[in-house]
Image (tube, coloured by chain):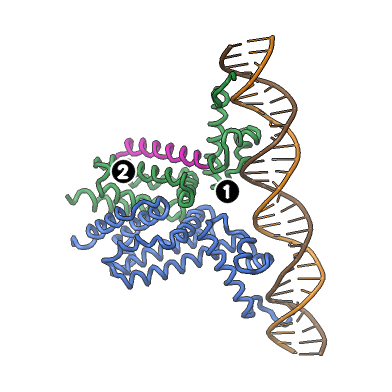
Chain colours: A green, B blue, C orange, D brown
Amino acid sequence: MKNPNPATQARSRRRRTTLLNAAVDLLAEGGFAAVTHRAVAQRAHLPLAATTYYFTSRDQLLAEAFAQLVETELTTTATWITRHGLTGLPEILTTDADRTRQLGLWELYVHAGRDPVLQQIARRWTDGCTRLIAQALDLPDTDPRARLLYTTLSTLWLELVVEQRPAEHARALLTHALENLLPPR
Amino acid sequence: MKNPNPATQARSRRRRTTLLNAAVDLLAEGGFAAVTHRAVAQRAHLPLAATTYYFTSRDQLLAEAFAQLVETELTTTATWITRHGLTGLPEILTTDADRTRQLGLWELYVHAGRDPVLQQIARRWTDGCTRLIAQALDLPDTDPRARLLYTTLSTLWLELVVEQRPAEHARALLTHALENLLPPR
DNA sequence: GATAAAATGGGACACCCGTACCACTTCACC
DNA sequence: GGTGAAGTGGTACGGGTGTCCCATTTTATC
């Protein structure tokens, strides 16, 4: 026995993350079905066998891609909120730049209803989002108002991404919800 | 020319709806990927070629299945609301009987973000739901309060179906939203 | 430098898919 | 009752998939 631990070499770890990033990109671009072993390998400029070497199955690959997508999306929206503050929150419904990225996330979110592994990540997503809203509103995480605002924001965002209707109404409704939720006290 | 219009015979029409129902069932049970020509044909006790005869492509089959799922779901929830009234609305978040059916609907809803044909049906779904809420609240369809309540209800329902957490908190939050939305006037 | 584990990559296997083909039967209408 | 279209169903084709196998190279430790 000379090299007891797998995935210990730097190049190896780099390859793994390359594959994972490729999977996330493909998921964002073409959705669920586009994440195949061959497509991921080609995207990462690696041989096909690399995918099965670093990920025991396609399900695992998808799960890790989902997890990574959730984390990055949470951090980016967190920085967005700290930069724009609460009053500019409705403006978040304009970010159709990475629309397909959001689509991929929601695809996996719904798919989590049939896969316990993904389900855990889905919960992480929901909890992370409500926490972000709570922080933006300067409320404790458990405050029903934060959770309430998240529910409307979530639906509006999903609708925007899926149905692609003009965002004006959505923004107006979100400001309405904000006024109706916070200042009346 | 003797029989100019296709699909005119009674047996033929029956077969078509049988296939469509089979597709809807499969979608509910196994999700998106489970709706294959072969599976649908077997489920309907019909030969494989029947699927390509009545539906020009798998996409069309999925689109029609989605449309049918939306319509039936809208009508069933409509009758549910008229029977239970507004006050019992939070109880709607207990119907985990056909959880997988809801899952299938949401799967296709998200997929609509990548398919213009499905997108139209997705809009029909959103509009139908908000209209139902508006009727339950005895408000005009365009009242922001109806739309607002729908957004929270939608997220809570999706969360319930996907994440399978206890429904108590969701129901409590919905009643909270209802009180906060209607009686204060 | 020897050695065993880790890493690499080319290829193959078995499977399932959507769809097309085509001979056949049944039907509606003259 | 003849005729052409509608409907039926068995079969085959081409392609893409996940996963596995195995020979080879590279690495870390002795």
Q: Is residue A70 magenta?
A: yes
Q: Amino acid at mark 1?
A: Ala
Q: Position of residue B129 (x, y in %)?
A: 39, 64
**Residue drawn 44% across the image and 47% down it:** A119
Please indicate whether residue D8 sits to the left or right of residue A184 in the image: right
- The answer to which quarter of the image holds residue B151 is bottom left
Residue A145 placement, left or right of A118: left
Q: Is the residue at mark 2 from the same chain as the one at mark 1?
A: yes
Figure quadrant of the C terminus of chain B: bottom left
Q: Nearer the viewer, residue B133 or A64?
A: A64
Q: Which residue is mark 2?
A: A133
State the residue at coordinates (53%, 42%): A62
Res. B115 image quadrant = bottom right
Give above or below for C11 relative to B108. above
Type of secondary structure dominating the magenta stretch = helix
Q: Where residue A13 sits: x, y (%)?
A: 54, 27
Residues at marks 2 and 1, CA–CA distance in whole angstroms:
32 Å
Instruction: Identify which residue is drawn at 60% across, 72% down.
Output: B16
Marked residue chain, label 1: A
Q: Position of residue C12 (x, y in %)?
A: 75, 40
* Label drawn at residue A33: 1
Relative to A89, is B26 above or below?
below
Which residue is found at the position 28% from the left and 54% from the top?
Answer: B173
Classify mark 1: residues with Cα within 10 Å, few (<14), some (14-19) or many (20+): few
Q: Look at the image and give the residue range highlighted in magenta.
A: A62-87
Above or below, comparing residue A172 to residue A69 in the picture:
below
Chain of the residue where label 2 is placed in the rendered structure: A
The image quarter in which residue B131 lies: bottom left
